[in-house]
Amino acid sequence: AYCATPSTSSLIMRGDQNQTYTWTNVTQSTSLGTGIAIDLDSTLVTVGDTVKCVAVASDGSLTATDSDTITIVNSVPEISSVNITTSSPNNESTVNCMAVASDADPGDALSYIFTLKRTCATINGCTGTTDIVTKTQASGSYTYTLSTSEIQPDDALICSVAVSDGTVSAT
């Protein structure tokens, strides 16, 4: 986070003023530090906290004070790719679903919820899409071996993924 300089014109223009910055976590009533900028990590703030910066500029005879507050929000994870690999989807073949995701919030551990689905081929006498398996993983990869009843020739496989940081999810 970056703290703005007070905007009292004569103090800012002269360049001989003393500037101080104070950061406070208003929600937790804790001092976070001093300086024009501060790195806000999970040891200092949590989602929902209000952080205040007070900037003071003084030339010894005039003083200007300004402050601003921000509320810490949680970023939604972003999924950049989802892939499904198998040599050929048939009975007893191994399927690997892979996802690449990230989260802008440092320290957020991601969990991946993989759902492997079958879309029936009309020649097999069925229609629609049915879930084969859903599995939560701590990593972006899930391997599953199809059984003889789960897929038929000409059926299609779909791998869908939801990624959660424990607060919000992306699909």
Image (cartoon, rainbow, N blue to C red):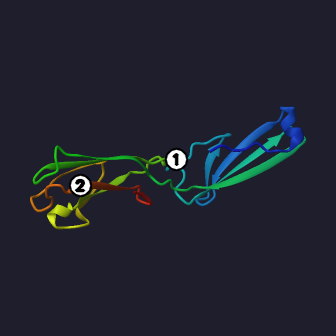
- Residue, disc 2: 157
Q: Quadrant of the C terminus?
A: bottom left
Q: Amino acid at mark 2?
A: Leu
**Element at label 2:** strand
Q: Give the residue drawn at x 74%, y 51%.
A: 67
Residue 95 is left or right of residue 62, and the answer is: left
**Res 151 visible:** yes
112 or 85, which is in the foreground? 85
Residue 78 is left or right of residue 117, and the answer is: right
Q: Number of labelled discs?
A: 2
**Res 100 visible:** no
- Residue, disc 1: 41
Residue 141's x, y, as percent? 27, 47
Q: Give the residue drawn at x 71%, y 52%.
A: 68
Q: Amino acid at mark 1?
A: Asp
**CA distance separating discs 1 and 2:** 41 Å
Q: Farthest residue in the front direction? A: 123
**Element at label 1:** loop
Residue 61's x, y, as percent? 90, 41
